[in-house]
Every structure is written in C-alpha cells, then in structure tokens.
Amino acid sequence: MSDIIGLGTFALSVLIYLRVQNETRRIRRSLAKLSNSEDLGLLIGQGESVKTVKPVALAFSLTPTVDSLKPAVEEFLKGKELKMPIEEVNRQGLSAKTIQDFYEAVKQKKLELDMKGYTEVHLFFSGPVQAGVIVGCLFSNWKLVKLYHKGAVTYEYWMPLVKS
C-alpha cells in the first residue's frame, strides 16, 4: 500500500513540476514579446503588483560616504507597510583592484539568499554604475528582483529587473 502511495506522490510531483516549468516558459515568452515603451509600463505595473511568500530587501552600500543603507531601507519599508528581512552588502568604495572581491561577494550573497528560500528580492543600491551592472548581470533571469531608486525624499519603486 505504501508503494502505491509513494508512486502516486511521485507522479503528482512530476505533474506539478511540469506544470510549473510550462508556466515559467509561458511567462518568459510573454516577457520576451514586450518591446515598446507601452509594454514597459505594463511590465512595471505587473512587477509592482506581484507579491510572493518570502521577500527580502537587499541593500548595497558601495560608497565611502555611506556605511549602510539599512536605516533608510527600514524606514521606507515601514512606510509602505512591507515586512521583510534586510540583507546587506557594504563596501567603503570600489576600485578596479577590488572589483573581483565584490563580484565574489555578490555571488556569495545570491547563494545565501537562495539557501534561505527567498522568493523575491527588493534591491536598493548606492554605488558606482559598474557595480550596478555586475549586480544586474548576476541577478538577471534569477527570480523576481524589484528595483528601487532613491528620490529626493525617499525610495520609489521603478521596475522589475528583466532580461532583454
């Protein structure tokens, strides 16, 4: 009897896996078809409305003038009534000599987020454009990553990170 239950559970697991893979392919094909600015507006709205079960805020502070973005991110999340842990990557600036260490730190942080089971990343960033490109490349096509920009007063949601 337990063998039958085990086989049934296995078959159900395979069916669920195939359905999730099919849905993922369908979503990726739909996103790939988005090409003009009207579609970008739709993508921005869709990204903002998606809420997953285990989000995390990830704050990168890579400038010598700011030790941590965590207080500002905490304030923003509290104002938006969003409850999630905040992970950080902090550096006192970057240079061509330290970029390899930064690259490895980002890969390590991505692995840690995966191991903790986070389903969505809210990305807050302060640092050089080159570092932002590295983060975008490593996080592209990974899981839902929402990008935020620091305006004059507080952060604002801009868009999800998408692969073109």
Image: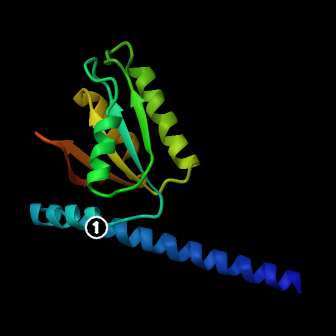
- The structure residue drawn at horizontal position 80% and vertical position 78%, both measured from the top left corner, is 6
Could you say where residue 59 lies in the image, as x and y percent from the top left?
Answer: 35, 38
Going by the numbered disc 1, the residue's amino acid type is Ser
Image quadrant occupied by the N terminus = bottom right
Which residue does the image show at 10% across and 39% down from the upper left?
152
Q: Is residue 161 visible?
A: no
Residue 144 image offset from top left, x and y in percent: 38, 56
Q: How dense is the environment of label 1, judged by Cα within 10 Å: few (below 14), some, or many (20 and up)?
A: few
Q: Residue at x 55, y 74 (%)?
A: 18
Q: What residue is at 44 percent from the left and 39 percent from the top?
A: 87
Q: Position of residue 125 (x, y in %)?
A: 28, 36
Q: Residue pushed farthest right?
A: 1
Q: Is residue 66 left or right of residue 85?
A: left
Relative to the observer, which residue lies in front, 32 or 156?
156
Give the colouring mode of the picture.
rainbow
Task: Specify the farthest residue to the top.
Answer: 97
x, y percent for residue 95 = 31, 15
**Can residue 69 be spotted in the picture?**
yes
> Circle 1 — which element?
helix
Nearer-the-camera pick, 24 or 63: 63
Q: Which residue is mark 1?
A: 49
